[in-house]
Structures are given as C-alpha cells and as structure tokens.
Image: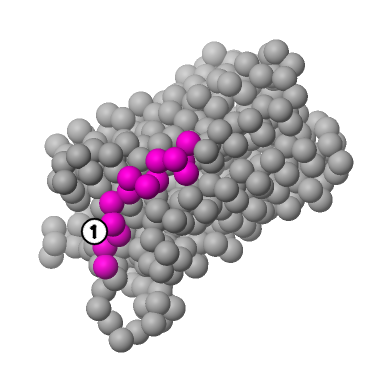
Amino acid sequence: MVTNLRASTRAVYISFIFLGVAMASFAARIPQIRDELGLTPSRLGLVLLSIAVGSITSLPLAGQIVGRFGSRRTVAAMAVLLAAGLTAVAVGYQFGVIPVLVGLYLYGFATGAWDVAMNVQGTIVERGLERSIMPRFHAGYSVGTVAGALAGAGAVALGVSVTAHVTFCCVLAAVAVIATVRNYLPDDPPEPSEKSGLRRTLTTWREPRTLLIGVFVLAFAFTEGAGIDWISVAMIDDYGTSAAVGTLAFAVFLAAMTIGRWYGPALLDRYGRVPVLRGMAVAGLAGLVLFVFGGHPALAFAGALLWGLGASLGFPVGMSAAADEPARAPARVGVVASIGYCAFLCGPPLIGLLGDHVTVLKGLLAVAVLLVLSIVITPVLRPPAESR
C-alpha cells in the first residue's frame, strides 16, 4: 500500500506539472499570437474567452464523468484532447482567428475535466498520507508553468516559431501524463443513493457551503488568471519593456506561486486554513497594488512576486475544502470548479474591455474587488466537523 501511495503521489504530481507546462507554453506566446492576428486588448480578451467557454462546458459534467469513468481514464483522455487543441492553435493562428477559437475551446474543455479529475485523485492521496499535500500538488502545476514560461522566454529570444514551440510542449505533456496515470489509486465509491448522478449534482448546487467555497475559489482563480493572461501584456504595453522582459515578469509571478504552494502546507497544518488564506489574500492585494502603481519595471517585478505569492493557496485549499467528505467529493469538486472557472469566463473580456479604456495595467484593479470579498468569506473553508 505504501508503494502504491508513493507511485500515485508521483503520478498526481506529473499530472499537475504537465498541465502547467502546456498552459504556460501557450500563455508565453500570447503576445506573438496577438500581433500576428492584429488584436486589440478587448478582442484578445474575447479570443481568450474561448478557453473559459470550453471549461464551463465540461465542468458541470466533470463530476459525472469522473464518477463513471474514474480519474485515471478521464485525465488520460483529456491529455490527448488538450494536445490536439493547442496544436490547432499553434498551427491555425497563421491562418486566422477561427482555428484559434476552435483550438482554445478544445483546450479549455480538456483543462476543465482534467482539473477536476486530478484534484479528486489528489484528495484521495492526501487522505492516504494523512497530511496536507494538495497545495504541493498545485505547486507542481506552478513548477510546470514556470518551466513552460522560461522555455517560452527562451523560445522568444531564440526566434523559435510559435508552431514548433507550442506543439512540442503540449505533445510532450500528453505523452508524460498518459504514461503515469496508470499508478493512480482507485477512486472512492460514490455515496449510496437512489438519486441519479445528475440529480446528485443538482442537489450539490443547492448546498450553501459548497457555493460559498465556489465563490472563494472564483476570487482566487480570477486573481491567478489575471496574472497569467495579462502580466506580460501589461509589462510590454504599459511599462514599455521588451517581449522577453515581459515574459520574465510572467515567470516571476509563477515562481512566487510555486514557492507559496510548496511551503504553504506547513503553514496550513500549523495555523489552519482560515488565518493562512486571509494572510495570503492581503499579500496578493498588496502585490497587485504595487504592480499597478509602482511606476517602474523593477517595482512591477516586486509586485508580481508578491501578487503570485498571495494567489498561491486559494485554489488548492478550496479544492480540499470541497472534498472534505469523500463520498461527495467528485460532485462538490465539480461544482466548486465550475464556479471558480467563471473567473476565466469573465476575466479576459472584462480586463480587455477595461484595457481599451483605462489601459490593461489599471484594468487589473478589478482583481482587488474579489480579493476583498475572499477575505470576508474565508471562514467557509473550515472543515464541517470543525465548524460543528
């Protein structure tokens, strides 16, 4: 059992890491794709909206998909679909917007179901280890994003084409994940009930705690997603840096998230979810303000670092909180992820629209509103037994 637990832990890490590699490989080339297509900030936001539309399509079904096919097969299938979608983007952007929209939709659909499935498996491993480890799995995702961002910066500096760079990275991710998911642990049996899977999911959508956790995750997903989508663009357009420097600021943001997620579990085990997450939200808010109003690229880098650190724990801790009761974990994780991913649906067009009117840099202040909300509702993360 110990051997199986170690192998499954490594497999979950690989799933998180290579989803991050694929995401950052694409995100690092957003400025070049934007330039090739001649997109304004608002139109770029609408193009990126395709990712969120794909995710929102898959997330309401993800709990049922994982419950029926298991987390292992779900992750493997979504890895193939993700590689196909990003390859379509990498090739299709040379021909127009339509291939990019289709490819990003497939990428978003795959990401949504993959995310739920690997988080469900992560909670199974976490219970087996009997300690907090979910943020470290998400740190694995951040490690992948840092590696992808640095590789992207190198590819830009060396003049490697978007097509060659993104295609290679996403195919590598699919192969690595498919080779390792066979070590996943068996999924928890569903809760005994006469209700169908669809009716159980609908019932979960009426649970106040689950919905509030979803809102909390939405706030942090918006905070994280805004940094991923717009830091490099803001550095290039508003701070006047080169493309390579803009991509490096993006990498600093991701590195800070990795640090927060790696060292966060020790803080969570010692102090608990509520005080740690409140502190992280305050740190993220301070970093965002410094990034927007710093006025110099060096201060913007410092702001990106603090912003990434503050954003690091919200999503993984929200997933753990949703899975506090194992039998309902797939349905609740699916609901929370569905709400959280609305940030990716609303975020790109909102900040892009604000960017057209007040610059992308000032438009990022929209993130501050949700961070303040997250500070208010943090107590919802307490485990049900502790609350009682």
Label 1 secondary element: loop
Residue at the (69%, 23%) spot, across then down: 236
As displayed, is residue 91 above or below residue 298? Answer: below
Between 316 and 165, which is closer to the camera in this rendering?
165
Between 268 and 187, which is closer to the camera in this rendering?
187
Q: Quadrant of the C terminus?
A: bottom left
Residue 354 picture quarter: top right
Q: Is residue 218 visible?
A: no
Between 157 and 261, which is closer to the camera in this rendering?
157
As displayed, is residue 12 above or below residue 262? Answer: below
Give the crowd class for mark 1: few <14, some 14-19, many >=20 residues within 10 Å: some
In the picture, measured across the screen, residue 153 lies left or right of residue 305, that is right
Q: Amino acid at mark 1?
A: Asp
Residue 151, horizontal then vertical, whole percent: 58, 21
Residue 153, horizontal then vertical, whole percent: 62, 19
Residue 16, horizontal then vertical, whole percent: 42, 40
Magenta region, residue range: 176-189
Tell whether position 255 is magenta: no
